[in-house]
Image (cartoon, rainbow, N blue to C red):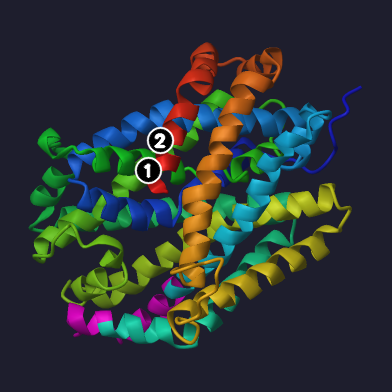
Amino acid sequence: MSDKPKHQLFATRLGVIAATVGSAVGLGNIWRFPYEAGVHGGGAFLVIYVFFIVLLGIPVLCAEFALGRSTHCNVLGCFRHLKPGQPFWKIIGVIGVTSGMMILSFYSVIAGWTLEYFVVSLKGEVAGNSTEELHSLFGDFTAGLRPVMWTVVFLLINYCVIVRGVRKGVEKASNLLTPALMILLAVFCVNSLTMPGAADGLSFLFKPDFSQITPGVVIGAMGQAFFSLSLGLGCMLTYASYFPDRTPLVRSAAVTVGLDVLTAVMAGVLIFPVVFTYGFSPQEGPTLVFEVLPAIFAQVSGGWFWAPLFFFMLFLASLTSTISMSEIGIAWLTQDRGMSRGKACVLVIAVAMVCGVACALSFGYWSGLSLPVIGEFNIFNFFDYTSSNVLLPLGGMLISIFAGWMLDRNILRRELTTPRTALSSLAPAIVFLLRYVSPVMILVIFIANL
């Protein structure tokens, strides 16, 4: 008889794909990818990004899937279950829970910004403002108390989903939100392709100029491939613990990676034709979404409709990702600490609210706060830097090493080939990459980001 813990599993194949794609697809695709591609040369960055997502994303995602599905345990219990006499490996679980809470906290602040801009776009308050005026408006907004309100509102919405459980909450919401997000993105792409600057925008995105490749471009593409799939913090491992045994892992990983890349490319198709049409630089950086695009929407025919729809789409992308981040801590509290799901949800959201409020205040009332542990960073930037540049690469590297070298090879091969599909034949290549390629690539990301 199996000694795997018994808990609720996803009910359908659609639920598996919708949840994993929803976790991967978020602001990293729709916000981060366009500005990373913009500052790193467009087409050349895209080619290198796809190259790394195949060599890095698919193997590490398969490793998380195999670890989660083989044990049906949370990110801490998984390694205790597989290596009961080696407590060192539980550090991966500690990294996962810690980084998950940190990202949930500051990510909810950005999600709150999307809610603010959705509301002000509906009210027409961004129309008629120049980029300089929008820059000032964004600065005034983030320095006030409204970000605190929106952070709390967003986390309460998140709570309303996760408290309903795996099937009625996480799976049902994913089945609704992920397709809605993809449909909205497709609608925006069609609209962008009708603009006068569409040819220039598409040329920038799809016509690589390899003379622009520098070490910075390579590192940026490698980092985007890693972070866009939510690897290293245990989201995918936790979701895989809800996979039925009949779920084909390699095929699920390939579909998740494929849709994640498609979403990033669609975001580029959405944004670059618009940017070139209205004479802006594609190298605007992180301000692209909250300062440049609102200025463009003010000039677009029907901008009163497109602007709020765009920020609503960003809200959906944020929600599908934060649901999975919340689930990391909830699974640990319910399985290892014996807490009811309701209480675990309250605790996770409460901690995220406290930390999220601190992050939201980092640009205003607490902007001058300086503690020895955070140095020159404000609280928001400390949470962002520590989780994204330290904990996630470290967790991803340890997961690769564990799956490639410490996990029983028979378990890994069994998980990757059960049930058998056409993609199951890739299992030996995935094992090779996990042992010899992925850890080295993640180490490069780790050192470069530090």
- Nearer-the-camera pick, 152 or 308: 152
Measured in 3D between alpha carbons, the distance from the residue under mark 1 to the one under mark 2, in whole angstroms, is 6 Å
Secondary structure, magenta segment, majority class: helix
Secondary structure category for the residue under label 1: helix
Residue 255 place in picture, x, y as percent: 47, 33
Q: Mark 2, residues whose alpha carbon is within 10 Å: few (<14), some, or many (≥20)?
A: some
Is the residue 307 above or below the residue 236 in the image?
Answer: below
Question: Residue at (77%, 27%) from the top-left corner?
Answer: 82
Q: Amino acid at mark 2?
A: Val
Q: Is residue 231 visible?
A: no
Q: Residue furthest front?
A: 372
Is the residue 180 above or below the residue 421 in the image?
Answer: below
Question: Residue 175 magenta-drawn?
Answer: no
Left or right relative to 161: residue 291: left
Q: Is residue 333 visible?
A: yes
- Nearer-the-camera pick, 158 or 184: 158
Assign the N terminus to one quadrant of the image. top right
Q: Magenta span covers which residues?
A: 114-135
Question: Residue at (62%, 65%) from the top-left corner?
Answer: 158
Secondary structure category for the residue under label 2: helix
- Number of labelled discs? 2
Residue under numbered circle 1 = 448
Is the residue 152 above or below the residue 338 in the image?
Answer: below
- Nearer-the-camera pick, 374 or 49: 374
Q: Amino acid at mark 1?
A: Ala
Residue under numbered circle 2 = 444
Q: Mark 1, residues whose alpha carbon is within 10 Å: few (<14), some, or many (≥20)?
A: some
Q: Assess whether mark 2 and mark 1 are in contact (beta carbons under 8 angstroms).
A: yes
Residue 219 place in picture, x, y as percent: 32, 40
Left or right relative to 95: residue 343: right
> Which quadrant of the figure has residue 418?
top right
> Which quadrant of the figure has residue 7?
top right
